[in-house]
Every structure is written in C-alpha cells, then in structure tokens.
C-alpha cells in the first residue's frame, strides 16, 4: 500500500535487477524504499527460466531461475520495503517523480529522492529483422515460447526451426526436444554463435541438434500456419548467396535474434542513451545523465548471467541510497569518458568520475569478432596505460577488466579507449566440442560455468584432467569422459495453486542416456498444491538415487 508521497529510493521493476537494487538500497541506509512491478508476481523473467545455471557467483551453487528469484524474494519479505505489484509505471520525470496506474489505487504519482530503473529488456521480433514471406501463425520469439511452455503448459509446435543462436533459443531447443518436438536446426546469420559455449554443448550437442552458422531464413511460407521456410547461406556482408536455397518443412519458427533494453521511460526522462548498448549512458556508480536516476541490469546493457545483473543492481541500489542521503554526487574532476576502439563492440560504464572511483573500477565490454590469444589495451591517446591478456574472446560472452584508480587519475579528464590488440582473429569457430586426439585423450568443453574451459581427459591415466581452472571442472571432466550426466528441468501439472504448472528438476545429475526415460515419469503427472521449493515430486528416478524436486513454491 502506498502510504507516502516521497520515498528515499523508488525501484522500477521487480525482476532480478529490481530485487537486488531494492535490497541493497535498504541495506545501505535508505529508510523508505518502494518497489513497483507491473506483473502480479515478483521475479520477472526468472519465473519462466526453469533451467539450471543461475547463482554460481552469488550463491556458489547452481540454481534454476525460480529458485534464484525466490531467494531474493524471501530476503525482501524479511524487510519493510514497500512492494506494489500490478503497478504499471507510465512516466519517470527528470525531477524523479514516478507516475503509475494500479487496479486498486488508480493513477498515482510519488517522488523519489533517488530512482533506480530496472525494467529489463525485450526481444527483437520478426518485424524488427524483416523476414520476407506470408504471415501465418506459428512464429514465436524464444521468450514467448518459453512463457507458453513453462508457465502455461502449452505446446507450440512439432517441427521447429530456430533462427538465431542466443542463449534463450539454445535453451528452448533443448526444452522443446525434451517435450517431444523435433528441432530441425538452429540457423545463425553470424559466423559465430550468440550464446554461451556451455549452452551449445548441453542444449544442442547433447541432443544432436545441428547449428548452421552464416545461414538465415529468407522466406516464411504458409497460409494459416507455418508450412515451410527457405534457408540461405549468406556472405560476409550478410547478403543471401544465390543458389544456396534450402527448403525445410516445419510448423513453427522460433526467433532468438537479440534483446533490446526496455528504455522508453529512460528516453522520456531525457536520459542520454548509448546507441551501441541501447541503454542509458551511465557513470561508475550506475547513475545516468539525470542526477539521482540510476540504471542497472538489462535495462543498462544486456548481460549473459543473472549473477552479474544482481551484482550491478546491488551497486546501483547502494549508490541510490547514498544519493538520497547526500542529495548530490561528488563530481570532483571532469569525468573520464570510456570509448571503444578496434575489436570492441561497446564499453560500460561510459563515464568515470575520478573522485567517485573506488580503488578499482570494473569495466565490461564485448568483442566484435572471435579472437584467440589477445591483449586488451586501455589507451589514453597513443599511450597504453594498462593491458590484459585473454586466451579467447567471442562476442557472445561479456568480458571484464579492472582498472586501478591511479590509471583513471592519470587520464586527467581525457578519454580512455579500450581496444583489442590481436593478430589471431578467428574466421571460423571451433564447433567440435568432443574429440579424441592422436594419443587417445578426450578433448571436451567444460559446462560447469560460462568460461567453457577446454579440457583434456586421459582414460589411460585414471581419467586425469588438464586444462581446468577449478576443481569443479576437474570433477566434471572425469565424469563426462567416463559416464556423462545431466541435471534435467521440466514442469508438471499442479492443482489448487495460482499457476497450472510447477517447475521441477532433478536434485542430482542423472546418466545422460536415461534423460528421455526420466521425462516419461512426468507425463500425465498431477501434483496437489500447495508445494514448497525443494519438495520431492518423484523419488529415486529409475533407481538412480536422484529425485525430481519442486523449484518454486506455489
């Protein structure tokens, strides 16, 4: 319930970024925090992301999306933060007045001493990329298909073609396959995948789903429903190559062609937008060009991992609380502008105020191409102030470097440029994810974290592992070479709760060859609510000792 006209911090959005920002603001001294979320439930996109892969950095364990979100929601419920769901924010003014509508309260306007924007992002649609052809049903974005399947329990099709190799598309390729659909292929316009290597391995390679790079859909055919697509190879300028047409019979097209920060509110507030990221230009403390308005998460720039979203949002919440207390930011010297140079797609933050900079400042960036052994250089005019080695760089994975404060001070208000110094640009990716070398060692990609370390396992030496950078990678290499196992995530019907589908997963990895038999145990299963996250739904799957457990409380 809204009980005040003014709050110390107002957070717009109740997804992973908004939850972390609100908690951090409260922990950092903000007395009155208001969180506004347009959906009826907190958690945002996490609620439909039933797969594993969240929480490795924040909680030091691998969680599903609902599990990750529920941990933050429980922390929030233990505070006196004011939460209003079902609140659609209409406007955020430069003077930090937030206007919204709600079914019970009608139109309201409240003021914040500081505001945090955490609205997330949206998907590019067919209209945004201009695929020619007729307009039948059966064309979905990957996120909408995820919503239909994981929240509403609907089947979207039987023969699927996926355009784009973003992480959501890769994950949905696996999800569709587990539910009995046939994924005919993933087609990517670029010469490299837009998703994490670990997702190519566990979502495509595991199920024999082909990935076709430098290919695109040039026509969708069908009257009432999708019937066929025309696929073409493309050249280095992304133009279809005549004579390479391939006709595929299918009933569904899934689009995983990129995400766009949700920034209508930011633009209306007069906040400067970076044309490269699609998000606000922001300082080292996540403050935008509008004083006292902060941005974080996918509204600032699109992230690979929700853990990084949470860390960034915590910084935004903390600094919003400090702004609410002090009323201004310490500007000190003129800000240092961070620019992107050769081989770099974008750099954030775009501005650093030396007086505000901590002992070290984290800089995030994406490369524009694939590189092997490379050096990341930070230059001030022609002088190299810092350099960082990298074994490999790919555009689908966000990178981080750390700048000491003395380098920022040394720039003295001049521009710093981040660029890649490398002569080992890759023109073709290595998409062989499991091979055996001449000495009988098994070469494979580790999937326990986004690093995707290249492992070598020697069966002749008790499955000795090299190439790993952590103990979890060593354990994975031994297991993968001897007897591959996987965590499986799905949903089951549930009665007498607010939703009709309950997300579940195996509490231990099960042998990879038993995956489809394990999925059959969920067919037709119906659970009576209420259910708590962690409750056992199916015991001792196929005698493996693993159980299917609930991953959301309903």
Image (cartoon, rainbow, N blue to C red):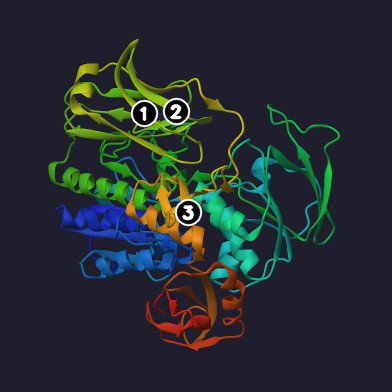
Q: Where, by quadrant of the figure, is residue 419 drawn? A: top left
The residue wearing badge 3 is 460
The circle on residue 389 is: 1
Place of residue 268 in the rendered image (x, y in percent of width and height, measured from the top left): 43, 41
Front-most of 530 and 39?
530
The residue wearing badge 2 is 373
Rate crowding at label 2 as few (under 14), some (14 to 19) or many (20 or more) other CA atoms within 10 Å.
some
Task: Check the picture and name the quadrant holding the C terminus.
Answer: bottom left
The circle on residue 405 is: none
482, above or below 527, in the image: above
344, above or below 261, in the image: above
Q: Where, by quadrant of the figure, is residue 55 drawn? A: bottom left
The label nearer to you, 3 versus 1, is 3
Q: First in sequence: mark 2 or mark 3?
A: 2
Place of residue 120 in the rendered image (x, y in percent of width and height, measured from the top left): 44, 51
- Taking the spot 57% from the left edge, 57% from the top edge, the residue there is 203
Is residue 70 toward the left or the right of residue 498 in the image? left
The label nearer to you, 2 versus 3, is 3
Front-most of 287 and 110?
287
Rate crowding at label 3 as few (under 14), some (14 to 19) or many (20 or more) other CA atoms within 10 Å.
few
- Taking the spot 51% from the left edge, 69% from the top edge, the residue there is 488
Whole-angstrom CA distance, mark 3 to mark 1, is 33 Å
Question: Which element carries disc 3, helix, strand or loop?
Answer: helix
Q: First in sequence: mark 3 or mark 1?
A: 1
Place of residue 58 in the rendered image (x, y in percent of width and height, measured from the top left): 30, 56
Q: Are marks 1 and 2 in contact (CB under 8 Å)?
A: yes
- Taking the spot 39% from the left edge, 58% from the top edge, the residue there is 475
Is residue 335 toward the left or the right of residue 511 in the image? left
Q: Are marks 3 and 1 in contact (CB under 8 Å)?
A: no
């Amino acid at each position: 319930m809204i009980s005040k006209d003014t709050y110390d911090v107002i957070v717009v959005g109740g997804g992973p970024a908004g939850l972390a920002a609100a908690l951090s603001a409260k922990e950092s001294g903000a007395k009155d925090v208001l969180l506004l979320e347009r959906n009826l439930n907190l958690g945002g996109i996490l609620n439909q992301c039933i797969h594993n892969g969240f929480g490795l950095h924040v909680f030091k364990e691998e969680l599903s999306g609902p599990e990750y979100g529920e941990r933050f929601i429980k922390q929030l419920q233990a505070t006196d933060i004011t939460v209003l769901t079902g609140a659609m924010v209409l406007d955020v003014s430069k003077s930090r007045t937030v206007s919204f509508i709600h079914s019970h309260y009608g139109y309201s306007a409240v003021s914040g001493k500081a505001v945090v924007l955490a609205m997330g992002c949206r998907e590019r649609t067919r209209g945004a990329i201009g695929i020619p052809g007729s307009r039948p049903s059966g064309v979905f974005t990957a996120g909408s298909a995820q919503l239909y399947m994981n929240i509403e329990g609907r089947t979207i099709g039987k023969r699927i073609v996926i355009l784009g190799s973003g992480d959501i598309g890769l994950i949905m390729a696996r999800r569709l396959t587990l539910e009995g659909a046939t994924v005919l292929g993933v087609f990517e316009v670029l010469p490299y995948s837009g998703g994490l290597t670990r997702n190519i391995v566990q979502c495509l390679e595991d199920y024999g789903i082909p990935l076709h790079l430098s290919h695109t859909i040039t026509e969708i055919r069908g009257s009432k429903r999708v019937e066929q697509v025309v696929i073409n190879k493309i050249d280095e300028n992304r133009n279809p190559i005549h004579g390479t047409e391939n006709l595929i019979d299918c009933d569904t097209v899934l689009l995983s062609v990129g995400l766009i920060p949700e920034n209508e509110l930011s633009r209306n507030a007069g906040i400067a937008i970076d044309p490269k990221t699609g998000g606000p230009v922001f300082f080292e403390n996540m403050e935008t060009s509008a004083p006292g308005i902060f941005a974080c998460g996918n509204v600032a720039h699109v992230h690979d991992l929700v853990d990084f979203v949470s860390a960034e949002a915590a910084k935004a919440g903390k600094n919003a609380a400090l702004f609410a207390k002090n009323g201004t930011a310490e500007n000190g010297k003129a800000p240092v502008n961070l620019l992107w140079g050769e081989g770099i797609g974008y750099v954030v933050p775009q501005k650093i105020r030396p007086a505000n900079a901590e002992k070290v400042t984290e800089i995030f960036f994406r490369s524009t191409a694939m590189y092997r052994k490379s050096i990341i250089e930070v230059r001030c005019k022609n002088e190299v102030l810092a350099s960082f080695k990298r074994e490999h760089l790919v555009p689908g994975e966000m990178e981080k470097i750390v700048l000491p404060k003395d380098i920022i001070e040394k720039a003295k208000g001049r521009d710093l440029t981040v660029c890649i110094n490398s002569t080992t640009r890759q023109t073709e990716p290595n998409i062989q994810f499991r091979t055996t070398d001449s000495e009988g060692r098994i070469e494979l990609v580790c999937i326990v974290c986004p690093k995707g370390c290249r492992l070598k396992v020697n069966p002749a030496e008790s499955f000795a592992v090299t190439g790993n950078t952590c103990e979890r990678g060593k354990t994975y290499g031994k297991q993968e070479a001897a007897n591959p196992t996987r965590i499986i995530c799905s949903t089951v019907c549930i009665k007498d709760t607010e939703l009709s589908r309950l997300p579940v997963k195996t509490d231990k990895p099960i042998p990879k060859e038993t995956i489809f038999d394990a999925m059959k145990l969920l067919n037709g299963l119906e659970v009576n609510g209420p259910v708590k996250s962690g409750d056992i739904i199916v015991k001792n799957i196929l005698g493996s000792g693993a159980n299917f457990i609930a991953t959301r409380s309903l």
